[in-house]
Amino acid sequence: YSSFFQHALNSGVRRYHVAPALCQRAKVAMSHFEPNEYINYEKLEKNINIVRKRLDRPLTLSEKIVYGHLDDPAKQEIERGKTYLRLRPDRVAMQDATAQMAMLQFISSGLPKVAVPSTIHCDHLIEAQSGGDKDLKRAKDINQEVYNFLSTAGAKYGVGFWKPGSGIIHQIILENYSYPGVMLIGTDSHTPNGGGLGGICIGVGGADAVDVMAGIPWELKCPKVIGVKLTGKLSGWTSPKDVILKVAGILTVKGGTGAIIEYHGPGVDSISCTGMATICNMGAEIGATTSIFPYNERMKKYLGKTGRADIAALADEFKQHLVPDSGCQYDQVIEINLSELKPHINGPFTPDLAHPVSDIGAVAEKEGWPVDIRVGLIGSCTNSSYEDMGRSAAVAKQALAHGLKCKSMFTITPGSEQIRATIERDGYAKILREVGGLVLANACGPCIGQWDRKDIKKGEKNTIVTSYNRNFTGRNDANPETHAFVTSPEIVTALSIAGTLKFNPETDYLTGADGKKFKLEAPDADELPKLEFDPGQDTYQYPPKDGSGQRVDVSPTSQRLQLLEPFDKWDGKDLEDMLILIKVKGKCTTDHISAAGPWLKFRGHLDNISNNLLIGAINIENGKANSVRNALTQEFGPVPDTARYYKKMGIKWAVIGDENYGEGSSREHAALEPRHLGGRVIITKSFARIHETNLKKQGLLPLTFADPADYNKIHPVDKLSIVGLKDFAPGKPLKCIIKHPNGSQETIMLNHTFNESQIEWFQAGSALNRMKELQQKSS
């Protein structure tokens, strides 16, 4: 591949060690872990100036950082919501469940080392069962093969490795890697958490991460920018979480699609840095590309406390590029007065169903939702900061002073080893245990379905309240009857003490052990520890300077890992007489398409994990999950079995979906699985951003109805043909012929968002196949 590299360097592919030469004013390392990789604000400034001169208008902060990372700022076509940008992100981060497939794809690319600083974080494979230490030990035993693969692959290809127990990827990034003006892509949908430190941090599928790690410009449709102007000041029971719960209620789960949410205005300064991260994190739930806050004193304070005062000092020098221009134009503006904002709780079953906490009891009774709370869960990547734990402990301390403990079960998930060690030292963990809490491992745990829940039977109707970000059906515990509500950690704590949704901590009284009534006071806590953070155990593995001799083993008999075989190329013909695997009714998230929980163990084995394909999606034909008609035998059976049957018979198939298909996680398995089992086309009313890109990357055709009403013209028993693929071109709709069983036909038009290079992915069979074609041409 040496000639490929020469070609790559000549054509603008970035080398890992070029960055230092570009820094003249000050050499400040991007992180403690990469002392020779420097922040390059000069390059950012130069690119912004080129674009500003071209566009001749004030720029939003989002535009500055995105356009500041353009591969060719002088020639790049820029139109918000229309053109595709070619970008040069600064770094890549991968969590262990998605890193397996990302690293398998990187290995099959044939490249010797990653081109940008990259990290793997072990946080998704630890199941919550009996408590932190025991659960971690069990996870290390069960997942030893996967952890060994990720550790050795990291060492061989120059990727930093955060061992199990280190914490959740997004908290680790905030503590160590995010900084004002960075562009970071991560193989997890909640990567936007880093926007709390003024970075453009975007969730992507593994194939996108492979592009960046291979030094190829990364494509993103030029985002629109939605401005959220914050006025007033947070106080009392209202927390940063309430800002995004309110925004989710306004914009809904698809209102942010194709846009960056940019917070600005005088209210920003009343929010802590970790509070801003909470707001950005849950922006994933409204479909936003990412979210961001302008650089300010709260970020400076956090950088200083996490040992990065040198980055803050450099950011101060370049501050004009880390805040929006005066007079910049947003595509839409939402205004929220923080002084008037009330505590919120969203759910059940969708994160955009917003209610003031004061109303939820009455709404639950009216709707028939269980009001008794079985479990309260605090922590997760959204809300596990020192401030979050402090505010929750402040509530718990008041209950303990009156002889009360939680009526509901109560769990605590620290976001990182640093947070765990610091809340142990400062007494917060002790208070939370005394009130009845169980401290879980520093991992995702129940938030992603890694929860061995024992207190209910599957199918039992119940309510849980969490400080998480998602509450899709069955997400936390695989029980479709669990009504999950998301709110702030302090509200979760208060409701867990009361044991009911009918309790409003702002107005209602509790009865102490002495029989006297008392009211909880609004919690107050330090945003950062008075002493330095306690780093806890050292859980980071540096990649060696030369990893070329490192072995990376994947056993051919492994049930957890499987080397990838290239997908077949397009045969140059139209897709004729495809069967419909399933016509999906209603919401279909990536949890419905490729469930997490117990299936996470197969994330490195494509054939095994394909046995969960669309098992959560509701079939419009019978209203059931995981039950579809086999068009050849007329028998109903599981979705994956039916897909395998069609594949075995050499028959191509399609999926018909509803609005915002593929919302939720960035997991590319939801695109790899249908491709692996013989799928060719996914036709919907609309797609979530990451999922649409993931489908394109794997050589599938994500298409949308030109007229959404045409969804009703297709029946599960029909056959479909996509014609005109020889003339497949950007902006040109494709024709779909619907063949009904009675012999009649209808023709409808389908739209797509493919650009020229993405059409080449389809023709080559996948983006990875196309990358290899280009390598072979240059060698």
Image (cartoon, helix red, strand yellow):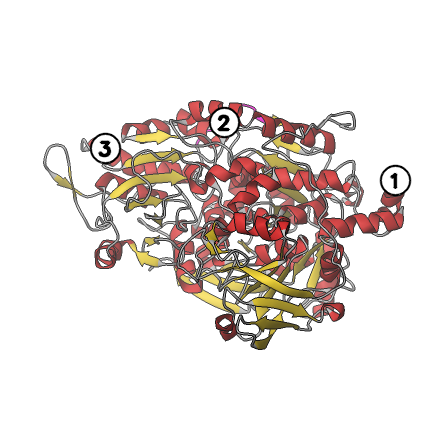
Tell whether 700 sits left or right of 687. Answer: right
Q: Nearer the viewer, mark 2 or mark 1?
A: 2
Q: Amino acid at mark 3?
A: Lys
The one nearer the camera, 248 or 127, is: 127
Residue 139: numbered disc:
2
Instruction: Answer with mark 2 or mark 3, whichever residue precedes in sequence.
Output: 2
Mark found first going from the N terminus, 3 or 1: 1
Q: Is residue 394 left or right of residue 252?
A: left
Rate crowding at label 1 as few (under 14), some (14 to 19) or many (20 or more) other CA atoms within 10 Å: few
Residue 262 x/y as whole percent: 53, 59
Whole-angstrom CA distance, mark 3 to mark 1, is 65 Å
User: Could you tell me which quadrant the N terminus lies in?
Assistant: top right
Instruction: Check the image and report above or below for 119 versus 722.
Output: above
- The answer to whether residue 323 is seen in the rendering is no
**Pointers 2 and 3 in contact (CB under 8 A)?**
no
CA separation in Å, label 2 and label 3: 30 Å
> Dot 3: what SS?
loop
Residue 619 higher or lower than 591, as above or below: below
**Does residue 69 show up magenta in the picture?**
no
108 or 293, which is in the foreground? 108
Q: Which residue is mark 3?
A: 405
User: Are discs 3 and 1 less than 8 Å apart at CB?
Assistant: no
Residue 535 inside the magenta-drawn segment: yes
Between residue 327 and residue 683, name the one nearer to us.
Answer: 683
Instruction: Tell me if residue 84 comes above or below residue 117 in the rendering.
Output: below
* Residue 250 percent coordinates (x, y): 41, 64
Q: Which mark is residue 2?
A: 1
